[in-house]
Image (spheres, rainbow, N blue to C red):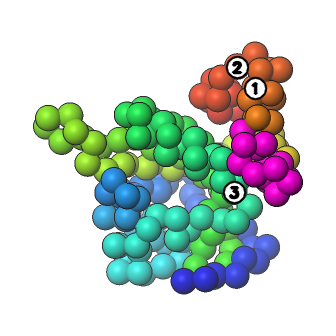
Amino acid sequence: MNVQTREQEYFFPKDRLLVSKTDNRGIIMYANEAFITIAGYKEEELIGKPHNLVRHPDMPKMIFKMLWSRLNAGSEINAYVKNRCKDGGYYWVLANVTPSRDVSGKTIGFHSTRRNPSAEALAVIKPLYAQLLDAERSGGITRSEALLERILEEKGVGYEEFVVSL
């Protein structure tokens, strides 16, 4: 489904969490009512579809590369994400994504819990993501990664520490 973007921002209640579970390939296996509602899809339109169905083109690809790298290494990750709704609008989240494991410890999928980001955090993230996107357009993901590494080095923090500090 190719959804055109539009400049309509949506918000969800601060006391709500958006939850989804995927298999190892990022195919949605579960979505809670809050996620279904804000995304604007029916449950049957989400279940069995790739989670990147809600990926907004304003998101730097290197954020997802880093996300998948950490998840595939067995680690959790926190990240700010701009998601696209079915109608082309968008909403921002602070996502915590963790591997789901079976009783033997094998990763069988991923669990994402997303909450409202603060306005203060978005005031930092929006211009940062715009810089990362510009770097990707001119030099690909490698340039975007190098830019983020340089910014974090200048701040003297790692990615997780940076995200959690906002």
Badges 2 and 1: C-beta atoms under 8 Å apart? Answer: yes
Q: Earlier in the sequence, mark 2 or mark 1?
A: 1
Q: Nearer the viewer, residue 123 or 27?
A: 27
Gap between marks 2 and 1 measured at Cα:
5 Å
The local secondary structure at tag 3 comes to loop
Which comes before the other along the chain, label 1 or label 3?
3
Distance Cα–Cα, label 2 vs label 3 = 22 Å
Image location of residue 147, percent across then percent down: 80, 36
Amino acid type, residue under disc 1 in the picture = Leu
Residue farthest to the top?
Answer: 156
- The residue beneath circle 3 is 59
Mark 1 → mark 3, Cα distance in angstroms: 18 Å
Query: Residue at coordinates 75% horizontally, 26% vertically from top-left?
Result: 152
**For marks 2 and 3 on the same chain, the one whose residue lies earlier in the sequence:** 3
Residue 145 against residue 54 in the figure, above or below:
above
Is residue 84 covered in magenta?
Answer: no
As helix, strand or loop, the secondary structure at mark 1 comes to helix
Q: Which residues are magenta?
A: 132-145
Residue at point 48% right, 36% down? 70
Residue 34 left/right relative to 105? right
Label 1 sits on residue: 152
Taking 8 as reference, is 32 above or below it? above
Q: Residues within 10 Å of mark 2 (few under 14, many from 20)?
A: some
Residue that badge 2 annotates: 157
